[in-house]
Image (spheres, helix red, strand yellow):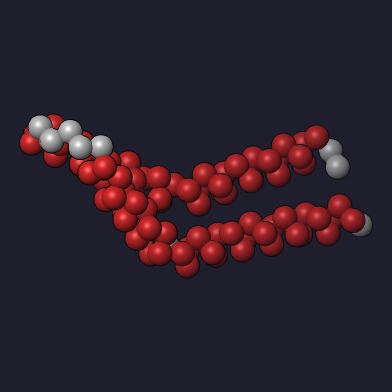
Amino acid sequence: MAMEQVIEISRDLLYTALLLALPTLAASLVVGLLISILQTITSIQEQTLTFVPRLLAAGLVLIVAMPWTMQTAIHFTMRMLERAAEVGR
């Protein structure tokens, strides 16, 4: 396997991992930002107040995005299996 192929596979792997993690991370970021703004406005500085809503939002996004996530992961797996078959020839 040539170095260019290894780099291309690595790039595809990292891009797919980022793509799969992005919805959950974005939801957690948005909820955390909203809770931080609410804490600043109300002067409530309770650390556990940010944890539960972010956890719930991340879980909800994981459930809602599951079909898309599975489809993306399956396409990635198929691409890698096709590349493995090409190398074996």
Q: Position of residue 88 (x, y in %)?
A: 90, 56
Would you say 15 lies left or right of 85 here?
left
Is residue 30 something one can see in this rendering? Answer: no
Is residue 11 something one can see in this rendering? Answer: yes
Quadrant of the image containing the N terminus: top right
Q: Residue at x 13, y 32 (%)?
A: 40
Q: Position of residue 42 (x, y in %)?
A: 8, 36
Q: Residue at x 47, y 67 (%)?
A: 67
- Name, please, the residue furthest toward the bottom: 67
- Name, please, the residue furthest toward the right: 89
Q: Position of residue 22 (x, y in %)?
A: 44, 47
- Name, please, the residue furthest toward the left: 42
Give the quarter of the image for residue 31. Answer: top left
Q: How many marks?
A: 0
Give the quarter of the image for residue 8. Answer: top right
Would you say 19 lies left or right of 34 here?
right
Q: Residue at x 72, y 37 (%)?
A: 7
Residue in the foreground of this view, choosing between 39 and 31: 39
Quadrant of the image containing the C terminus: bottom right
Residue in the foreground of this view, choosing between 79 and 30: 30
Q: Residue at x 86, y 52 (%)?
A: 87
